[in-house]
Every structure is written in C-alpha cells, then in structure tokens.
Image: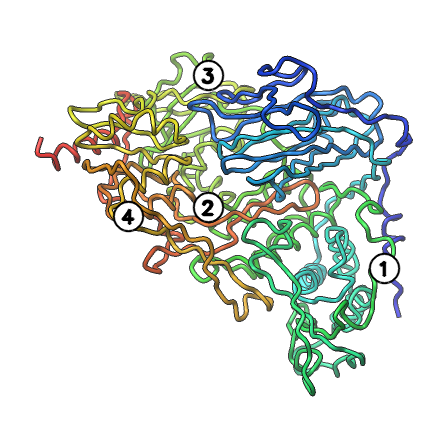
Amino acid sequence: MRVFRTAVSLVLAFTLGAVASAAGAQQPLELGFEVGEAGGLPADWFVGTEGWTARLTETRATAGKRSLELAPGEGAAEAGSVMRWLPADGWANLSVRLSARVQVVGGGRAQMWLRVDNKDGSMGALDNMAGRAIVAGDWQDATVEVDVTADAQALAFGFLAFDRATVFVDDVVLRPAGRARPVQGPTPPAPLSPRGLQNVAAASRLLGYLRFFHPAKALVDLKAWDHFAVALVEVAEPAADAADLAQRLQSFVRPFAPTVQVWAGGAEAVPPAVPMPEGATHRWSWLHQGAGTVSGHRGVYQSRMEKKVLRAGEAAAGGPDDGVADLGGGVSCRVRHQVPGTAKATLPAAPLPDGWTPRELPVLTAAHRSTRLAAVALAWGVFQHFYPYFDVVDTDWAAALPEALTAAATDADASAFLHTLRRLVARLHDGHGHVGKAAAQPKDFLPVAVAWAGQELVVVGKCSEVGDAARIGDVVVAIDGRPVALCYEQLAQEISAATDGWRRHRSEGAFVEDLPTADPVLLELRHPDGALAEVKLPRRRERPADARPKRPGNGSELAPGIVYFDLDGAANAALDAALPALQAAAGIVFDMRGYPDEAAVRVMELLLTEAGTSARWIVPDVRKPDRQEVEWRESGRWRLRPRKPHLAAKIAFLTDGRAISYAESIMGVVETYAFGAIVGAPTAGTNGNVNPFELPGGFTVSWTGMKVLKHDGGRHHGVGIAPTVPVVPTAAGIAAGRDEVLERAVATLQQQLGR
C-alpha cells in the first residue's frame, strides 16, 4: 500500500514565506469618526468616484456620536467609494484585520475592502468581501483580513457602495490578527501527460461530488476546500493506471469520508457497499437552493443540510446505486447523497483531520501549477452541478474540463492563467460570466475608444496626444496588420455572452485594454470620406474617453411635444424633477441603453393601468449531482401596481445589447405590457441574480445562478428583448455626431402622433 502525505506534511511541502514580526508589535488603530467638523470629510479620507460625497454625520452612529456617510449625488455613477491609505511600517509580516459596522439604506449593497500595495507597484493582497456583500437593513458587522508581506509599502482600505446605495460606516478598527500566513512557493509549468490528464480530470469530478453532495461531518466542517483541491490533484496526477488512481483517491478521501468508495472499472464492478453503522436515527442530505455554499449563502442562494427522522424499517442511507458515478480514467465512485446519522451529526463519526483549518495552511498562488489545476477543478465543478442554462446553450461542458486543465498546467504565470479561466467561463455563454483578478488590472491602453456600428468598429474617442491622426467616426480596418474581424474573434473566445450584442459591447472595452498589440500600435483606418490611412500610436496609461455627444438632459424637449428621460442610472429624485415635463408631453422617449436605477420600476408603475408582474425568476433546488432531478422554485417575482400620475403619452424605449440583467427585467415589463415602441437592438439576453465566488490565487468569478423566463414562460436566455423598430448606428452617423437610434425614436413618435 502506498503512503500519502497527511495534511500536516502537505503544508510543510509548500515553499514558505518568511515570518518575522510578532503580532503584538503593532497596536490596534481606532479609526472612528469623532474628530472633525460634521458635514465635512474626515481627515485623510477621500472620495474615489465622481458624483459621490462622503461626510461626517450625526444622524446615525453605533460608536460615539458620528458616523461616515457615503452617498450618491445627481448623475453619480452606479458605484461609489471612499478610502484612505496608511504606511505599511510596523505591519509587515502580520495578518491584518479591518473591522467596522456598516449600514446600507435604500437598497443596493456595500463592501469593505483592504489592500496591500507593494514597493514595486504590485498588489500584495486584497480582501474586498467578494461574495459576501452587505445588503440593506440594520447595522451589520463587516470584517476583512489580509497578510502583509515584508515588501509592503502601504495599506489601502475603504468602502464601496453599489447600485447607488447610501452607506453609513462606524467603529472602524485596524488591528493585527497574528502572524502572516506563509506563501505557497512557485513551481515550473509542465504539460500533463495523457494519463496525468485523465487522473486530474477524474479527481476534479470526484471533488465536486464530495464538496456538494456527500454530507459527512468532516466535509461539511471543511473550510479549506481550495487546499483540499490542491492536495487531491497532487495525489491523483502521478497515478500509473486506473488501479493506482483508484487506490490513491480512496486513501486520500477515507479520513474525511469513510463510506466513500473508489474503484477501477465501471458500474458493473461496483464493490459491496461499506456497512452502515448502527444507531442511526436520521438520514442526512444536502439541499442546495442554487450554489449557496460557494457564495457564502448570498440572497436567494442558500444551502442547508436536511435531516429526516427514520421510520421503522426505513433505510439509513440511499439505495445501492446512490451516488455511483463514472469519474473517467477507468475509475468509478460511490459518493452517497444520503447518509445515516443522529439528530446531531452524521455517522460514522469522523471529525475533520488535524491541520485543515485555513489559518494553518499557506496562502495559495497561481504561480504554483497544482493551484492552477485545482482552481480549474473547483470552477468546473460549480458550473457542472449548478449552472441553469446548459439546456439552452450550445457548449460541450465535459470537453471544457480537459481543455482548461491542459492549458492551466503550462500557463507561465497568473496573467496567462487568467485567460485560461476566462476561456473556460466563456463556454457557459452567460452574459454575467466573468473572471477578474485585482492584481492583473491593465496598465496601458490603446489610445482610442471604439464602438461597434453594425459590423464596423468605429473610433468614438481618443487621447489628446492622438491629435488628427485618428478622427471620431473613423472605421478601424486592421490592428497591427490583423483584420478587425480576426481581432474580435480572438477577444470573443474570452467573453462570456448569451448574445452577439452583449459580446460586442464587452469587446469594445477589451479592444482597448485586453487585445495584445505592438507598442506603438499600427492602426489601419478608413476615414469618413473613404480614404485609407495607417497610423502608429503609442499605448497610454490613461483610458481614452468616449467623445460622442452627451445624451439630452432629462425633461428636455426633443421635438414639439416629445420629451426625453434617460433611465441609465436614474434615481427617483431625477424622475421627480422631470415629472412635470413628462406629464405634459404628447410623446416620451425613455432611454434604456445601459443600466437603470430605482426610477425605472417607478416609471413602469406610472405606465401601468392595472396590476402587473415581472418576468419569472426560478431557483434550482439541487439534491443530486450533474443536474439530476432538479426542481425549480419561483422566487421574488415583482408585484407592480399602477401609480399616479399615469403617463398617457405615446412612448418609445431605446435599448440595445448593453442592456443586461435588471435592465432586462424592466424591458421585459415594457415588452409584456406593450407600453410603446422598442427602438434599437436586442438586449443582452441574460438575467437573474449573480452568484460570485473566489478561486485560489486571487481570482473572482461571476455567473448567473438562477433561470429567468419571460412572463409567459418562454425562453429569455440568449433571446432577450427584441426591438419593434430595429436600428443599427452607422459610422457616418457617429462621424456626424448623430444619435441615429434616438432620431428614429423621435420619428416613430411623430408618426404615431400624426405629425
């Protein structure tokens, strides 16, 4: 029998970072808000987003008399931030914890964050409460923690408000929380052998079954799933054949789940089940309402253990075929979904082995090959068991696993691995699908902003240094000698989208920041007069801004009797200010080319003449792996009621591929209740609550965790809301400073009004 490394020896096998300072060397810092003039910004804090304000206020507090209020102003962006810096002196080699009391008012959410900035300009660590945001309600405790390395220069921390929420903050304390955890050392990239690929893929499938569907106490108590995944792929990869792989997996899993069985062969070779222990009074199993465990039980996504009292003669576990599955590589497993237990715990009693608490284990980094493989395994498993749209998207998800593992094994660094993860998530065709890494933010950009006009990529902005070399309205024909169509094809491989409209919208930013180009970049342009030109432009550190004319002001008259209102980011205060003009209008253009705010729901109710509802949001109830026997439960459907004053004007809504999620909830109401013309292009075809999670190495993944159907039960994903008046902007229109979609909406209303 082979002997495998225990958790303790596994930790010792990592390359450890130096730990020098004692936790008591630095005293806690009380960062309350009792000093300073009420109504002003506290000393050393600053607002990081235009249109937002932060001030000391005495209206709410939990410690002392004052708190800090972060609030959006008129026209502010959807998200706002307030932050400050501290020198890292004295905090090196410590684990640092930032705590506060936070209250969110008026909807939306908030996140506290703490970041380490290194002396070389890189980011050392970040905890931004991804997946555990604070939502509206009473005061709540918030805590983030990072490790400060020896080369740290500064600590940056602050608070983020999303969806234009107003956020109050109090009782902020920065304190040492022990010595910094050691850091996993790098390992060289190396390709997986054909047998090694089968082994790691089999381990990846087993990982998902154990993590989500086997309720043994040790697995339920395990918090270090990232490290478990790393150890599992390291145990599996060297296996010489199926028998060796089965024995390795069985030996590794046994201390955590004594009744799990792994064997060489298929279902026909299934061994006798492990005898069930005596004394069982209950049967335990997981119920996942969406993938609750991966997001920290966020909103509608919850996971819980179900305990059923056994009746006389009732089996204490599932039947003989319960949990039998083919892992690939010539290996199968029995991972029971139902296990015996008492009212307090599962049986047999198998506590979590020593050495598996997160603070006992090193920080994982994407510079380590096994961590990259484990991250792929973890991500693939979440989607394999919980992604709700595999029935309508065209993808081979089984093939996506070996492809991603193969790339991860040879990725040179975290940046290369980021692209691997993005290609994996793009296979979902989910407009919410995205992979980010705070330490991998782009450092330079193309010096021009671009937007699609049909199939043509058009210059819509530029850095000042570009001058007349590129003009607004120029069509980009090629970049570094590559036709734009090929460049788009390259970028599209890493953009998760359910529709081409959303993919092209996302690609507009990707052309500027993600497309690999020379420096200076060579652009082939076609000017509005048809002349071709080649220009070389150096990349720039600043992102170029969109220079197209701003949208009209809310309440402004576009033509006699026709009034405009922009719902992109509009709060109720903006609607109140424009309401007199909207009431008096014969025709109204509502602009939904973007992401709305609270005013959008109110507009729906001002247009309704009878009670209405939103689209159908349904959450999967999952008890078995591989999306077997999923039940769907409707959750949180809006109930809309008419409001006064009723807007009786002729209506036109502008929309296009950038309208996603909440914007499509609004446009679905517009479509169902036929409020007016829908002018522009189809929406993004992606709706439903996002369910983000984190992967080892500092990657954050977002995706859609529920299914959304149209009001009549029809498909929304990949379909979206179609325009009744299709309009495609043109390069000539952009060059002339025209908004052709808005122009068509005005013309449509004029025709309806007989003007």
Q: Which mark is residue 671?
A: 4
Q: Nearer the viewer, residue 93 or 168?
A: 168
Q: Which residue is mark 1?
A: 353
In the rendering, at what x and y percent does residue 414 appear?
67, 39
Could you tell me which secondary element the residue under label 4 belongs to? helix
Label 1 neighbour load within 10 Å: few <14, some 14-19, many 20+:
some
The N terminus: image quadrant: bottom right
Please tell me how crowded label 3 is: few (under 14), some (14-19), or many (20+) other residues with Cα within 10 Å.
some
Q: Which mark is residue 463?
A: 3
Left or right relative to 744: residue 314: right
At label 4, the amino acid type is: Glu
- Looking at the image, tell me whether mark 3 or mark 4 is earlier in sequence order: 3
Q: Residue at x 60, y 28 (%)?
A: 60
Q: Point out the frontmost of discs 4 and 2.
A: 4
Image quadrant in which you'd find residue 97: top right
Q: Quadrant of residue 700?
A: top right
Amino acid type, label 1: Pro
Q: Nearer the viewer, mark 1 or mark 2?
A: 1
Residue denoted by label 2: 431
